[in-house]
Amino acid sequence: MVSHFRDWLGEAHGVDFDLSEGDYSRAVRHRETGEPLPREETWPLLNGFFETEMYRQTLVPHAREALTELAGIADVVVLTNLLDTHQERRIAQLEAVGIQHRVLCNQGGKGTPVAQLLDEYGPSAAVFVDDLALHHLSVEKAAPQVFRLHMVAEPELAAMMPPAPCAHARIDDWAEATGWIRDRLTSGLDARTMPMIGEIS
């Protein structure tokens, strides 16, 4: 999403999106001064993107094939940090590229909704995949029995984002990640016995 959001910001609003510092909160900047936009100006821009520009987003390579394969052995849920008002648009967007799985919108850390999904489905094993370290921390606290895979599928962002300390592994490609996820789902292991990235020296 980063490149699509950045292009739209430049075209429609004349501001830049620079993640070179790896800090989302300071990434949207005035083009003339280079100063970050305050948070109260940034969030409406992000919301505006999802209201009218979601079509710009393209499918991550191998994601559709990976999710289709994994759906043969697991329930797949897309947990996306969007306002609830965007849920139907997100569902339509994903269905248009062949991803037809349950979609849930969330605001804030993803640990609580993941724990709620565990209560609902009662799985023998679960894997959480996300690109942001803060969500891996949130899930580790709320549902430590879940295996956590840090995936940053956008190459530009992957190059500058370090592995999430609370994840169990970092893999940035769905084709490679499929085997790791399948093994975690079928291993019979407890995620709490597996070292996290931040615990490996």
Image (cartoon, rainbow, N blue to C red):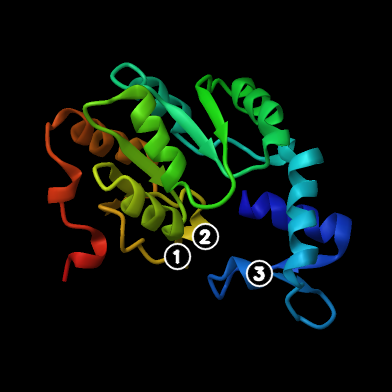
**Whole-percent x and y of residue 167?**
30, 54
**Whole-percent x and y of residue 141?**
33, 54
Label 1: state its secondary structure.
Answer: loop
Query: Marks 3 and 2: which is nearer the front?
Result: 3
Q: Name the residue type under label 3.
A: Ala
User: Which residue is found at the position 81% from the left and 74% from the top?
Assistant: 31
Label 3: state its secondary structure.
Answer: loop
Left or right placement of residue 114 versus residue 97 in this view: left
Q: Name the residue type under label 2.
A: Leu
The image quadrant that residue 15 belongs to is bottom right
On residue 161, which mark appears? Answer: 1
- In this figure, which residue is indicated by the disc labeled 2? 157
Circle 1 crowding by C-alpha within 10 Å: few under 14, some 14–19, many from 20: some
The image quadrant that residue 143 belongs to is top left
Query: CB of mark 1 within 8 Å of CB of mark 2?
Result: yes
User: Which residue is found at the position 49% from the left and 55% from the top?
Assistant: 155
On residue 27, which mark appears? Answer: 3
First-in-chain label (1 vs 3)? 3
Q: CA distance from mark 1 to mark 3?
A: 14 Å
Q: Is 6 located above or below residue 147 in the figure?
A: below
